[in-house]
């Protein structure tokens, strides 16, 4: 099956909502691929896979390793890889080098980077040179040290106006889609209506042009999740119960059973 393309994503503006999930591994990519338009190799893997305190320490090499695995595990969805903190901010040229390296290492179709007005020239630079860019505005986790936490954005008029400006600048610069994260709903709706590039909400609004969640949050792998996460399962409970069952059978010598051991022919 042919993969979802940039023009196909753009065409979904105002239409059937775009479905995106994060994937970091080959097996989750295989399982999510038939159901998703886009798979995001998010730098959230820093916390989810590596137990880091934020996305700030994530490296380009980590993104490349997981990005390649997700591309290998998918056939249909467009794969987008997050550019990690420090790999793109200093100049458009630096961003191009990092993004081109990521695409070569992984085979992904595009990159995502965080930021608004200040990053717009960088987005334009990449897009004009053939690299599809997904933007990310509102709550931008790489800026956690500036923002002071992960609370919703846009509650003051000044903050709301900045989010709109940021999103419009990234759309004008040529981004093919825009993640709008942790923004009060009226601002997410206003931004969605004011740009012709599809918005993908997370903690934003059902009126965005698509939605994304961190897969492990959605699957119930964690005890604590942000308010905007809906848990569609209890993977943590499922996995720990199976681990307990296995441990009990090992201790009682019920495992391995006759089916699992080799005998001489
Ligand atoms: O890193 C990530 O998972 C993300 C999504 C939550 C949008 O950026
Ligand atoms: Na991210």
Image: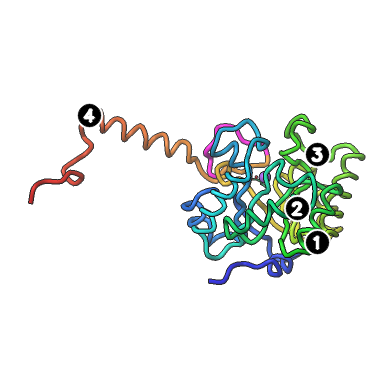
Crowding near pointer 2: few (<14 within 10 Å), some, many (20+)?
Answer: many
Residue denoted by label 2: 135
Residue denoted by label 4: 252
Q: Position of residue 229 (x, y in %)?
A: 64, 42
Q: Nearer the viewer, mark 3 or mark 1?
A: 1
Is the residue under label 4 in contact with that under label 2 (CB below 8 Å)? no
Residue span colored magenta? 219-227
Task: Find the distance from the CA under tag 4 to the CA under tag 1.
Answer: 62 Å
Residue denoted by label 3: 153
Q: Is mark 2 within 8 Å of ligand 1?
A: no
Is the residue under label 1 in contact with that under label 3 (CB below 8 Å)? no
Q: Is residue 221 magenta?
A: yes
Tell me the residue at 63%/30% (across/down): 53
- N-term mark: 3 or 4: 3
- N-term mark: 3 or 1: 3
Q: Secondary structure at mark 1?
A: loop
Q: In the rendered image of this protein, does residue 91 appear above or below residue 249?
A: below
Q: Is residue 90 magenta?
A: no
Residue denoted by label 1: 174
Q: On the rendered structure, is 216 left or right of 149?
A: left
Crowding near pointer 4: few (<14 within 10 Å), some, many (20+)?
Answer: few
Question: Residue 241 appears in which quarter of the rendering?
Answer: top left
Task: Find the distance from the CA under tag 3 to the CA under tag 1.
Answer: 24 Å
């Amino acid at each position: 099956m042919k993969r979802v393309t940039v023009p196909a994503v753009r065409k979904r503006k105002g239409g059937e909502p775009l479905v995106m999930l994060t994937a970091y591994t080959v097996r989750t990519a295989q399982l999510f691929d038939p159901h998703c338009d886009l798979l995001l190799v998010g730098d959230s893997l820093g916390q989810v896979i590596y137990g880091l305190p934020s996305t700030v320490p994530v490296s380009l090499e980590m993104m490349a390793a997981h990005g390649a695995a997700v591309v290998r595990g998918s056939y249909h969805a467009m794969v987008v890889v997050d550019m990690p903190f420090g790999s793109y901010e200093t100049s458009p040229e630096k961003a191009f080098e990092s993004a081109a390296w990521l695409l070569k290492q992984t085979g992904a179709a595009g990159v995502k980077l965080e930021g608004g007005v200040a990053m717009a020239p960088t987005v334009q630079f990449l897009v004009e040179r053939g690299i599809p860019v997904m933007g990310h505005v509102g709550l931008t986790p790489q800026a956690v040290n500036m923002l002071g936490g992960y609370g919703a954005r846009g509650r003051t008029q000044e903050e709301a106006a900045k989010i709109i400006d940021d999103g419009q600048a990234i759309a004008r610069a040529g981004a093919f889609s825009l993640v709008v994260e942790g923004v009060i709903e009226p601002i997410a709706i206003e931004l969605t209506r004011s740009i012709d590039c599809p918005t993908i909400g997370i903690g934003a609004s059902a009126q965005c042009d698509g939605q994304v969640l961190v897969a492990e949050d959605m699957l119930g792998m964690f005890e604590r999740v942000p308010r905007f996460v809906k848990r569609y399962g209890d993977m943590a409970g499922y996995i720990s119960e199976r681990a307990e069952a296995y441990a009990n059978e090992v201790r009682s010598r019920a495992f391995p059973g006759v089916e699992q051991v080799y005998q001489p022919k």
